[in-house]
Each structure stands twice: as C-alpha cells, then as structure tokens.
Amino acid sequence: MAQILIYIGKSSNFMQMKNKLLFTYILISSLFIACSPEDETTPTEDRDKFIASWTCNESSSITGSNPPFTVHINKGTASDAVLIENFYGLGFTNKATGEITVNDIDIPTQILAGNTIQGNGTISGNIISMHYSVNDGAGVDSLTVTFTKQ
C-alpha cells in the first residue's frame, strides 16, 4: 500500500511540473506573438496620393481650352505641403505651394512668376479636379482644371 501512495505522490508532482512548464510556454509564446512586426502598421501621409507626374488639362476663362501639359507634384517641407512644378504652364522652376487635407488640396494666395494665384481641388482615384485663378496684373484668368496621373 505504501508503494502505491509514493507512486501517486510522484505522479502528482510530475503533473504539477508539467502544468507549470506548459503555462510558462504559453505565456512566453503569447508575448512573441503580441510583439510580432506583422501587427505594426506604417502610417501614410495624406499627400502621398498627390505625389506624381500629371497631365494637366485647363479650361481658361480667357483663352478657352489650352493644350495639355505636364505638372509634377512633389513633397514640400511640412508633412501636409506639396510643391506643384509647372503650375499654369509657368515652367518647372516655378513651384506653387499647396496644402493637403485628406483628399483636398488648397493653393493659398501666393505670387508665382509675377502672377497672384489661388485655388483648391479634390483628388478621386487618379484624377485631381481643381479650380484656380491667376491674376497677371492686367486681369484674372479663372480656370477649371483636371490633372490625370501619368
């Protein structure tokens, strides 16, 4: 009878040790799973969808429909800023500044190559629809514009 009690006692200690090891293994495994790099998300900036080369089609209140030309939109210094090269066909060295909020672009009043410009627009997929005005000092040109991603 004494032998049976000793065997049961050893078996009980063995089961307790086995349970502790299993619990420790599950705890450590869950820590590695919880810290997996796959769970991390990389934030993107709202302006990223605007950064590209675009074909610009302008409809002018002064000249009517203008021939298409290329515009480049690049990141500006601030996280919501963009630089628009060749805005209004004024050349790639002239860069208008825009501010991005989600899907909207605002071009605050500024002087570009001697012209006062301002406007706004919205991106949807690969199209930016904009309205802006350009004042060269002799008159104001109001434009409806479509940028199509190249």
Image: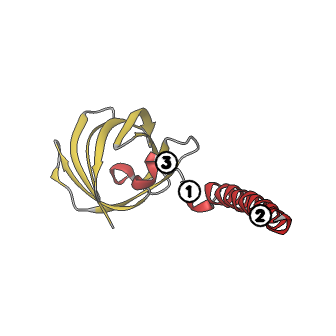
Residue 127 lies left or right of residue 49; in this view the side is left
Q: Secondary structure at mark 1?
A: helix
Vertical placement of 116 versus 31: above or below? Answer: above
Q: Which residue is mark 3?
A: 45
Tag on residue 39?
1
Tag on residue 126?
none
Spot occupied by residue 40 in the image (x, y as percentages of width and height): 57, 55
Tell me which amino acid carries mark 3. Answer: Glu
Spot occupied by residue 118 in the image (x, y as percentages of width and height): 35, 34
Q: Quadrant of the C terminus?
A: bottom left
Q: CA distance from mark 2 to mark 1?
A: 46 Å
Q: Secondary structure at mark 2?
A: helix
Tell me which amino acid carries mark 1. Answer: Asp
Mark 1 or 3: in front is: 1
- Which residue is rendered at x = 67% and y = 61% of the image? 29
Q: Earlier in the sequence, mark 2 or mark 3?
A: 2
Q: Residues within 10 Å of mark 3 (few under 14, many from 20)?
A: few
For residue 66, say whether it is visible: yes
Mark 2 or 1: in front is: 2
Q: Are marks 2 and 1 in contact (CB under 8 Å)?
A: no
Q: Would you identify the image quadrant in which residue 65 lies? A: bottom left
Q: Are marks 1 and 3 in contact (CB under 8 Å)?
A: no
- Which residue is rendered at x = 58% and y = 44% of the image? 77
Vertical placement of 60 versus 7: above or below? Answer: above
Q: Which residue is mark 2?
A: 8
Front-lying residue, 98 or 124: 124
- Which residue is rendered at x = 81% and y = 60% of the image? 9
Spot occupied by residue 67 in the image (x, y as percentages of width and height): 22, 61
Q: Earlier in the sequence, mark 2 or mark 1?
A: 2
Tell me which amino acid carries mark 2. Answer: Ile
Q: Secondary structure at mark 3?
A: loop
